[in-house]
Image: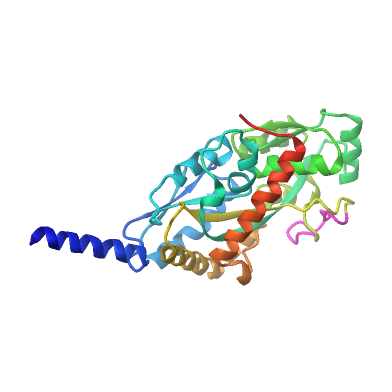
């Protein structure tokens, strides 16, 4: 009789988790597969307190770095699909990495989307002593000095690497890409003049541009960014196709039940409606998603488009990582 009771209780628990009514039953871990202090980490930390309030369980950040974000991503891909382990992703680990790495430990299209945290405009910035003062100056200098312009990135396959790779393709230049273990050391070398430039997201470069310690040549979007109004848009700078929005999203392991996804999505959207959270996101130069981009279904479709787009970019560049 007792065994029958235990079996019935277990089945009831499984059913409640599947329909999302009891989710979460214990703390939720959001794996950030990038270094602490980077833009994805910063944006994720902005929402966890409000998500904790909505879900009634602690929502914790765990940084699992390595291989351009693919190490932590692979771990989440194998996690239990119960919503208690989630992943922060961007165009590197959830899109371009699938084409960039010769051996893949996961397929980003199999993750189940929770939702978008924010989009982040990307910039090309240079050391103040670099001779170029405009994007066209930069392109002319790079053409005259092939592979002599050193651009840093937060790791091969990162947003900063892919944005400069895309710029290289569009402008018809050859740059030397130098990979670092995260954004912070790349920025240190840019400030010291060890490297010439970097293509990176607004949260990483806007404070330095505002302080005058680096020079912004272009923001890779159709309009200028209010936080740094003197930096021209890609349309104004003469390279209109150079439009690359970085983005930060949350996804769940493959086969996570939709009711659980709906609960997590609701908690994320509640966080993004919090005025204090929105203010923090906007202060670093990022943009919370508009209402029409707030659903898990929209995010799923967007991810598939990004995988296709960046697969083409990587293929055309002939880039690959062992």
> Left or right of 247: which side holds 169?
right
Q: Quadrant of residue 317?
A: top right
Q: Quadrant of the N terminus?
A: bottom left
Placement of 185 over or under 23, stated as above or below: above
Residue 254 part of the magenta segment: no
Q: Confirm whether residue 75 shows in the render.
A: yes
Where is residue 17? Give x, y as percent: 33, 63
Q: Residue at x 64, y 35 (%)?
A: 156
With 187 as the anchor, is 129 left or right in this view? Answer: right
x and y, in percent, of residue 127 in the image: 78, 38
Please name whichever residue, 104 or 201, is drawn nearer the observer in this view of the structure.
Answer: 104
> Which picture quadrant has residue 173?
top right
Instruction: Name the residue located 82 percent from the left edge and 56 percent from the top edge.
Output: 233
Residue nearer the viewer, 40 or 106: 106
228 in the magenta segment: yes
Colour scheme of the picture: rainbow
Is residue 199 something that shows in the picture? no
Q: Residue at x 46, y 58 (%)?
A: 48
Q: Where are the magenta residues, as a range?
A: 224-236
Position of residue 310 relative to residue 26, above or below, is: above
Position in image of residue 293 (x %, y %):
62, 66
Majority secondary structure of magenta residues: loop
Left or right position of 138 against 153: right
Q: Is residue 124 above or below residue 48?
A: above
Which residue is most to the left?
1
Is residue 83 left or right of 228 when viewed as pictured? left
The C terminus lies in which quarter of the figure? top right
Q: What is the count of numbered marks?
A: 0
* Picture layout, residue 184 above or below residue 48: above
């Amino acid at each position: 009789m007792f065994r029958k009771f235990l079996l019935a209780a277990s089945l009831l628990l499984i059913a409640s988790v599947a329909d999302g009514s009891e989710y979460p039953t214990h703390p939720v871990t959001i794996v950030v597969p990038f270094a602490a202090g980077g833009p994805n980490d910063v944006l994720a930390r902005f929402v966890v307190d409000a998500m904790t309030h909505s879900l009634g369980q602690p929502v914790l950040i765990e940084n699992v770095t390595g291989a351009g974000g693919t190490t932590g991503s692979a771990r989440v891909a194998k996690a239990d699909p119960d919503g208690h382990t989630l992943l922060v992703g961007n165009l590197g680990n959830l899109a371009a990495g699938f084409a960039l790495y010769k051996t893949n430990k996961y397929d980003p299209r199999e993750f189940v989307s929770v939702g978008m945290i924010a989009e982040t405009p990307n910039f090309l910035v240079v050391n103040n002593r670099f001779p170029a003062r405009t994007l066209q100056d930069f392109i002319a200098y790079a053409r005259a000095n092939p592979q002599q312009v050193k651009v840093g990135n937060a790791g091969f396959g990162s947003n900063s690497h892919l944005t400069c790779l895309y710029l290289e393709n569009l402008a018809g230049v050859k740059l030397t890409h130098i990979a670092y273990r995260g954004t912070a050391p790349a920025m240190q070398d840019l400030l010291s003049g060890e490297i010439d430039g970097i293509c990176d997201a607004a949260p990483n470069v806007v404070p330095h541009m505002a302080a005058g310690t680096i020079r912004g040549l272009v923001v890779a979007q159709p309009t200028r960014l209010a936080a740094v109004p003197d930096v021209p848009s890609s349309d104004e700078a003469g390279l209109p196709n150079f439009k690359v929005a970085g983005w930060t999203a949350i996804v769940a392991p493959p086969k996570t039940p939709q009711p659980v996804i709906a609960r997590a999505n609701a908690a994320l959207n509640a966080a993004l409606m919090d005025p204090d959270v929105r203010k923090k996101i906007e202060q670093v130069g990022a943009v919370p998603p508009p209402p029409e981009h707030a659903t898990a279904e929209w995010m799923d479709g967007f991810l598939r488009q990004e995988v296709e787009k960046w697969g083409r970019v990587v293929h055309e560049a002939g880039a690959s990582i062992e």
